[in-house]
Amino acid sequence: MSGRTTVERRPAERPAPVHPVPLAPPARPRRKSRLGAWLGNGAVQAVLIVVALIWITPLAGLFLSSLRSERDNASDGWWTALTDPSQLSLDNYTALFRDSGIGEAFWNTVLISVPTTLLVVGIAALAGYAFAWLDFPGRDVIFLIVVGLLVVPVQIGLLPVAKLFGAVGLFGTVAGVVLFHVAYGLPFAVFLLRNYFAEIPREMLEAARMDGGSEWRIFSRLVLPLGRPAIASLAIFQFLWVWNDMLVALLFADSESQPLTVELQSQMRQFGSNIGVLAPGAFLSLVVPLVVFFAFQRHFVQGVMAGSLK
């Protein structure tokens, strides 16, 4: 026998031919979808324009009526001032602040709305930060009590608080109206800001504490700037609610401290046809909230968008 081992040789396998994969043609823009999107946007814009005109028309009519004399308002409609601008003058506003109680009521409304808004926002911001990031005994229980106060209607507290204010000498004063609005505005404000501050990343606060920042410095330099959209939204809602309130002011304010809503209601009851006084007073009660809203509109939209993304 031979010591050689026969090795069977196999033919080398040839690699399979690689066929080039045909590239897909570039996607063509769908003209129909783009046209539909364009038509959709145009339709939405048209609807918004119509809605805006419907809402602006009464305001424009009230403004033009406030600039016309009582005789012109009694003879024809306010739209005639568009073709005859000579009817417009500031005499009604001059007489409003000089001869009627609406001017004083306007400043009473400012004295009630501005301090109330500042106090509610300031106290709620401090309390919201404490409930969100500070550990103290009974924190959760106290917060649940605050949340429970949201279900208490305002009408329940009118009579007891009126008796309390009468005993301490606050009934019929601007300070009494402010304190009532602050007390009933705080539960919602604390609940809103606490939930917003709780969404701030914990790592940011821990890094600030490691750098030696105190709680007050963290609150003022970090939390407040981050919470500006929520604070602006709260300030807008609180101001509008207090500015347009009549129930609380009708009960807690006297003739010297009553706001614009109560004074206008009194003027309508006594002088129902006195358009020369009612029109400029009603326009003032409408234009101030509009100015406040548009002044903080950017922060308000940021707060709404931030809440939708979380």
Image (cartoon, helix red, strand yellow):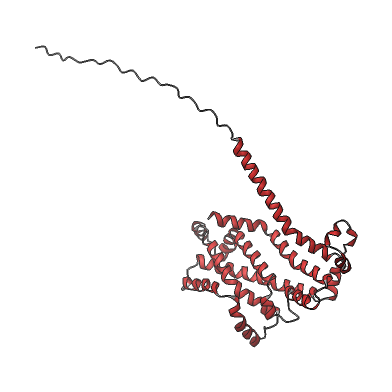
Residue occupying the far left of the picture: 1
Q: Determine the image quadrant of residue 224.
A: bottom right
Percent of width and height locating residue 71: 89, 68
Determine the residue positioned at 86% across, 59% down. Answer: 80
Q: Residue at x 71, y 65 (%)?
A: 289
Is residue 215 shown to the viewer in this render?
A: no
Is residue 87 toward the left or the right of residue 161 in the image? right
Residue, far top: 2
Q: Nearer the viewer, residue 195 or 125?
A: 195
Question: How far across and how far down the image is residue 123, in percent?
Answer: 60, 70
- Answer whether residue 238 is visible to the viewer in this image: yes
Name which quarter of the figure residue 168 lies in.
bottom right
Q: Residue at position x 65%, y 42% from top? A: 38
Which percent across, then down, holds residue 260?
74, 73
Q: Nearer the viewer, residue 249 or 300?
A: 249
Task: Using residue 226 as the reference point, say whether residue 20 is left or right of it.
Answer: left
Residue lying furthest front: 75
Residue 110 place in picture, x, y as percent: 73, 71
User: As drawn, which residue projects farthest toward the bottom?
Assistant: 167
> Is 290 drawn above or below residue 10 in the view shown?
below
Q: For residue 113, what is the image quadrant?
A: bottom right
The mark total stands at: 0
In the rendered image, which quarter contains the N terminus?
top left
Residue at image x 69%, y 74%? 246
As drawn, 297 above or below 42: below
Between residue 33 and residue 93, name the one nearer to us.
Answer: 33
